[in-house]
Image (cartoon, rainbow, N blue to C red):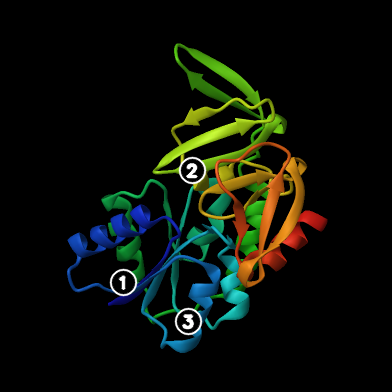
């Protein structure tokens, strides 16, 4: 069986690959893709795999965008941090999902369901519509506050007071407007899923920035953008050429 893994967190992708090899050494992972752009290019240029594992939230947007830009005709098993009530459509349509963190039993269950398909199904576009509607109705609400562990206390922090969130060397820190800095044991990917997408933007692999913290933007080399905030930052915030249009659309809507 040939498969692809679409996951923007390297460790998560490698973990899933290792689980697949452990369960069935005959499974061949053709590609490990990290973005919408990379996935669209792969599916456009290559024959379809037997199966795809796809994270719902990628660093450059929702993986649902892939289906609008490339011929994804293979069955898809989604991976997600959403609970099962937001994804009932998958069970109804016999396309499975893996709830993060992913374990061996869940992967075995998903593969067993896939192997029971007869004949091999094509991706159902109606399922995608059903899924989007289900997620809008049942998705996890955005956080309004965080409780930050700090020494022997838990410090309440309103989301409205967050200027940016930064990750370096696998350490994540939340930076409010008052100049404080709080370390938190969570990845940028997980935190971004808990924030209001109208108020926060995943600028790159290191930054989540708040709309109201943005001071201005500077043109950067290679048609990129450098985003300047009203507060000091550890390093420049660069928006890649491929995501400039997405960023401008987010900022102006």
Instruction: Measuring from the top left, give residue 28's x and y in whole percent.
Output: 26, 75
Task: Please count the marks in the image.
Answer: 3
Q: Earlier in the sequence, mark 2 or mark 3?
A: 3
Nearer the camera: disc 2 or disc 1: 2
- Eyeballing the image, is 38 above or below 230? below
1 or 126: nearer the eye? 1
C-alpha span from label 2 to label 3: 31 Å
- Crowd rating for badge 2 (residues with CA inside 10 Å; few <14, some 14–19, many 20+): some
Specify whether 120 is left or right of 166: left
Whether the residues at callouts 3 and 1 have beta carbons within 8 Å, the answer is: no
Q: Earlier in the sequence, mark 2 or mark 1?
A: 1
Tell me if I can see residue 73 in this picture.
no
Q: Give the residue number, with chain letter if any, for mark 1.
A: 115
Residue visible at 41% across and 88% down in the picture? 47
Task: Name the element at disc 2.
Answer: strand
Name, please, the residue furthest toward the top: 152
Instruction: Measuring from the top left, give residue 200's x and y in whole percent.
Output: 68, 46
- Eyeballing the image, is 20 above or below 201? below
Q: Give the residue number, with chain letter if any, for mark 3.
A: 43
Task: Name the element at disc 1.
Answer: helix
């Amino acid at each position: 069986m040939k498969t692809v893994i679409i996951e923007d967190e390297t460790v998560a992708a490698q973990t899933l690959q290792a689980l697949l090899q452990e369960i069935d050494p005959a499974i061949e992972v053709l590609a490990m893709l990290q973005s919408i752009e990379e996935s669209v290019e792969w599916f456009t240029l290559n024959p379809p795999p037997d199966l795809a594992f796809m994270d719902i939230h990628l660093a450059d947007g929702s993986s649902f965008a892939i289906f609008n830009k490339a011929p994804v005709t293979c069955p898809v098993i989604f991976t997600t941090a959403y609970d099962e009530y937001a994804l009932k459509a998958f069970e109804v349509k016999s396309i499975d999902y893996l709830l993060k963190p992913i374990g061996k039993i869940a992967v075995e269950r998903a593969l067993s369901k896939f192997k029971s398909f007869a004949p091999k199904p094509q991706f159902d576009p109606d399922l995608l519509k059903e899924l989007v509607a289900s997620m809008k109705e049942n998705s996890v609400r955005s956080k309004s506050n965080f409780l930050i562990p700090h020494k022997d206390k838990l410090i309440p922090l309103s989301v409205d007071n967050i200027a940016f969130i930064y990750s370096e060397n696998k350490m994540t820190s939340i930076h409010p407007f008052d100049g404080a800095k709080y370390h938190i044991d969570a990845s940028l990917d997980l935190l971004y899923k808990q924030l209001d997408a109208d108020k926060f933007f995943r600028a790159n692999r290191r930054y989540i920035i708040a709309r109201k913290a943005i001071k201005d933007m500077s043109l950067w080399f290679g048609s990129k953008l450098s985003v300047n905030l009203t507060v000091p930052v550890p390093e420049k915030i660069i928006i890649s050429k491929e995501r400039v249009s997405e960023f401008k659309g987010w900022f102006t809507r």
